[in-house]
Image (cartoon, coloured by chain):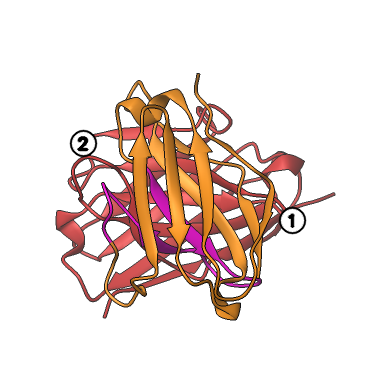
Chain colours: A red, B orange
Amino acid sequence: QVQLVESGGGVVQPGGSLRLSCATSGFSFSSFAMHWVRQAPGKGLEWVAFIRYDGSKKYYADSVKGRFTISRDNSKNTLYLQMKSLRLEDTAIYYCTKDAGYSSSWCMDHWGQGTLVTVSS
Amino acid sequence: SSELTQDPAVSVALGQTVRITCQGDSLRSYYASWYQQKPRQAPILVIYGQDNRPSGIPDRFSGSSSGNTASLTITGAQAEDEADYYCHSRDSGGNHVLFGGGTKLTV
């Protein structure tokens, strides 16, 4: 079965950096686009970034563009999110999600359990 | 616009039918998807495309769309359907993802 396991979350000071990883299994990772989605405490879902199956296209939410970088290693079946210049408002659970590959809809058919990033001084 | 709008809260009696709606200009170009999230759990996909259910999603969940409005209907709501529901689509420009603000369903 499809498994997505995030890691790398933790507490970081404002202005700091953190790298999240998402180890995947149970599907052909190199054939599917992937996303990062976050959820601030008590708030709704916010899309963060998208990467095409081959890494050739990357898109970002305006709130993180220029600070976050999404990448993938298809040889390791792993997705990454490099986060720099972190702000208090980046505090959230970060979910790794698999794109369903359905009709260019970018819907997400599998989600990891998330990793908590807390930005605090 | 680059937003998806949902009612913040909806309630339904056990066994009755409820419709949760989502409005946005992007829905004229892209199908909505719907996600269910229960407390302290990750979201799960319940409806995608015109009206498709992933494996394991009960057939009491259905989707529909007209113009700039998408709807999630639960026919015969069960206690276990109490959750937050989020709609989703690509934005009209095609290179961002939009989520609605979420609807808290009380059964």
**Magenta stretch holds residue B34:** yes
Residue at x 52%, y 34% (from the top left corner): B4
Q: Chain of mark 1?
A: A
Image x and y of residue B51, in percent: 28, 53
Q: Amino acid at mark 1?
A: Gly
* Viewer-nearest residue: A72 or B55: B55
Residues in magenta, as a range: B32-52
Q: Is residue B76 above or below residue B97?
A: below
Disc 2 marks which amino acid?
Ser
Q: Disc 2 versus disc 1: distance between alpha carbons?
A: 34 Å
**Residues flagged by tags 2 and 1 on a common chain:** yes
Dot 1 falls on a residue whose secondary structure is loop
Q: Secondary structure at mark 2?
A: loop
Residue shown at the point (64%, 64%) measured from the top left: B12
Chain label for disc 2: A
Q: Residue at x 50, y 18 (%)?
A: B1
Residue A56, labelled with which disc? 2
Residue found 76% across the figure and 42% down from its top = A88
In the picture provided, is A14 more to the left or to the right than A53?
right
Whole-percent x and y of residue A10?
Answer: 66, 63
The image quadrant of residue B29 is: top left
Q: Which mark is residue A42?
A: 1
Q: For mark 1, does the 10 Å Cα neighbourhood hold few (<14), some (14 to 19), or many (20 or more) residues?
A: few
Q: Is residue A96 magenta?
A: no
Q: Position of residue B102 (x, y in %)?
A: 60, 49
2 or 1: tag closer to the N-terminus: 1
Residue B68, compared with residue B16, is above or below; it is above
Badge 2: how crowded within 10 Å, few (<14), some, or many (20+)?
few
Is A1 on the left-hand or right-hand side of A7?
Answer: left
